[in-house]
Image: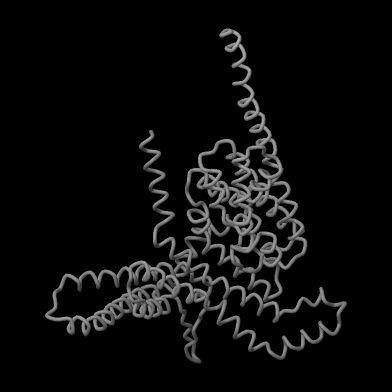
Amino acid sequence: MESMKVSTLTILKNIATHHTVVALQKSLISVIGISFIAGLLMIIQNPPVTQLSQIAFITKDWANFATANAGLLDLGIQFTLGFIGVYTLIAFIIGLCQHYQIDPFHPVLSGLGVYLILSVGLNITAEGVTFDYQYLGSSGILVAFLVGILVVEFNRLTLTLRGKIKTKDEVSTRLAQPIEASLASLILITLALIARFFLQQKGILIPDLFFNTLSPLLKSSNTIWFVLLVVTLSKLSWFIGLNGNTLILVSLMPMMILLSSENLIAYQHDKALPYILTTGFLFFEMGVLPLVSAILLFSKNKAHRSSAKLGLMPSLFNFPETMILGLPLTFNGSYMIPFILSSVISLGGAYLVMMAFWVSKPLFVLSPALPGFLGAFFSTLDWKALVLWFVLYLLSTLVYWPFIRQLNIKEAQAVSTPTQQAEPTVIELI
């Protein structure tokens, strides 16, 4: 039983720290700024006139500016949000190449060629051929990851084969490298063209296959039960010593970025935002911050209070490792239940409030290192989200109180028990 437990933990840890997962995480973080710029351009393009109706000169000037520069703003949105799949692909390939110590130039070029062949739609009419670029945006992120892995691994294979073939001198080796890299790119592009030909016969693209497969998941993600399941699995991962953010949340990050993009598109067309489980929604998952606050407020354990003081600033910026390892929180049964309950309350409460339309749904993609209360406000642009965050933070902190109180009682009893047992021993000796 113990060996099975160790094996399971080892497997999960290897998954969480695998270079592909790390490169995926870095690539998604790298496009956050691009998504944020797209959101700002959409807000400029669609001024909230109803909220500014009392300030006539701002409403008029803003609306006139948006109308006069509509084409330029559309172009900016297309080159940010519209090509976010392309940017993710480039960042992902570079991340994998850095791990393998491969020159990323040819993999990036061949990856872009394969990605465009598989993702750009063709509409052939009597007037000519038009191109459909919708899958170069957030809808194509999953295809970007697949293409990135395929391209980098194929280039690794060609380098390995070349290494087994001995050349006469160093000059021949340097001359052969670019030729071999170009040949690898040609093979990949040829395979992509063949795949595109067969898919075109059925009138579908590679991204269509992904969407058909993921459609049930996208529908289920817009439910509170899915949110609670995800947060529970993430907390349990932290409890057994694994990075729950990397293992659980990062695996869902492509989907959450896709849902964020759908919200941005809905905002651009003045429609109701359809999704809640977006990247901005995770700012209501407060991590270990409620635990730190509860220990500082209620705990009498000096060691725990010292760990909480050290972990206060990191936890404020959503870095839980200081408390996870310093308390420690791993395999700590005293804190397991409130650790899970605090996030269930915060995310579950936020979901219900947004589902009732009392607070706006998240719109922007922001850096996860932003303090939660700021992220909640800026991702929704709703002052009520700030109030909601602090209310949920208070409730999540209070969840720890009965458990910490029980720990205080046990520790007090443990300190007093040896003293009470020592007195009879002294009397007997006298």
Farthest residue toward the right? 54
- Looking at this view, is 105 or 261 the one in front? 105
220 lies left or right of 201: right
375 lies left or right of 425: right
Indicate the quadrant where residue 16 lies. bottom left
Farthest residue toward the front? 430
User: At 58% across and 56% down in the image, what residue appears?
Assistant: 221
User: At 72% across and 68% down in the image, what residue appears?
Assistant: 381
Q: Position of residue 277 (x, y in %)?
A: 61, 59
27 lies left or right of 14: right
The answer to whether residue 318 is above or below residue 77 is: above
> Which colour assignment does the render follow?
one colour
The answer to whether residue 155 is above or below residue 285 is: below
Q: Position of residue 327 (x, y in %)?
A: 56, 44
- Looking at this view, is 125 or 130 the one in front? 130
Q: Position of residue 136 (x, y in %)?
A: 50, 76
The answer to whether residue 300 is above or below residue 264 is: above
- Looking at this view, is 10 or 196 the one in front? 10
User: At 69% across and 67% down in the image, what residue appears?
Assistant: 378
Q: Tell me the quarter of the image containing the C terminus.
A: top right
Q: Position of residue 167 (x, y in %)?
A: 14, 78
User: At 28% across and 79% down in the image, what residue appears?
Assistant: 181
Q: Tell me the quarter of the image containing the N terminus.
A: top left
Please count the marks in the image.
Answer: 0
